[in-house]
Image: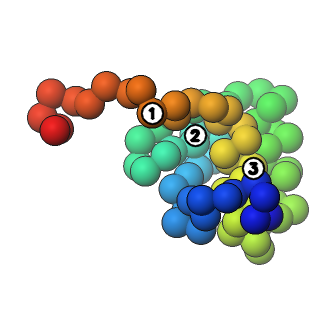
Amino acid sequence: MSEIDKRNRLSEEPFTYQITKKGMVMVYYDGKQIKLIKDREAYRLIAKIKEVEDDKTKVQLLLAKITGNFKRGNEKLGKNKK
């Protein structure tokens, strides 16, 4: 795991998820929704999460991989943030 998470960011548990009644998975990063996963992909993700739910780092890694490379460092700050 150390080669994948070199900066040890996943130990902070930045990703959370919520499974809806319809079987969709909403993925959040620091409390903000970043991805909505539906249909077959959602069922696969739920199955993978249930396999590794005891290891929080593996769950974080699954969520990080499913979201892709969404955070590159060039995001604009909001109006009220400096």
Q: Is residue 20 visible?
A: no
Q: Residue furthest left?
A: 80
Q: Nearer the viewer, residue 30 or 47?
A: 30
- 54 in relation to 52, above or below: below
Q: Residues within 10 Å of mark 1 (few under 14, many from 20)?
A: few
Mark found first going from the N terminus, 2 or 3: 2
Residue on which the image places disc 2:
26
Left or right of 54 in this view: 34: left
Residue at mark 1: 73
Quarter of the picture holding the C terminus: top left
> Quick one: SS at disc 3?
helix
Count every numbered label the image shows and give the total: 3
Query: In the rendered image, which residue does mark 3 sit on?
Result: 62
| Mark 3 closeness class: few <14, some 14–19, many ≥20 residues within 10 Å | some
**Alpha-carbon distance for marks 2 and 3?**
13 Å
Q: Nearer the viewer, mark 1 or mark 3?
A: 1
The numbered dot on residue 56 is none
**Answer yes or no: do the residues labelled 1 and 3 have beta carbons within 8 Å?**
no
Instruction: State left or right for residue 19 relative to residue 82.
Output: right
- 3D distance between C-alphas at marks 1 and 3: 21 Å
Residue 52 pos. (x, y %): 82, 64
Task: In the rendered view, tell whether residue 54 sits above or below residue 62.
Answer: below
Q: Quadrant of residue 45?
A: top right
Which amino acid lies under the numbered mark 1 shown in the image of this protein? Gly
Neighbor class of circle 2 (other Cα within 10 Å; few <14, some 14-19, many 20+) is some
Task: Give me the C-alpha separation between circle 1 and circle 2.
Answer: 23 Å
Taking the image as shown, residue 55 lies to the left or right of residue 14, namely right
Q: Amino acid at mark 3?
A: Leu
Judged from the image, the secondary structure of the residue bearing numbered disc 2 is strand
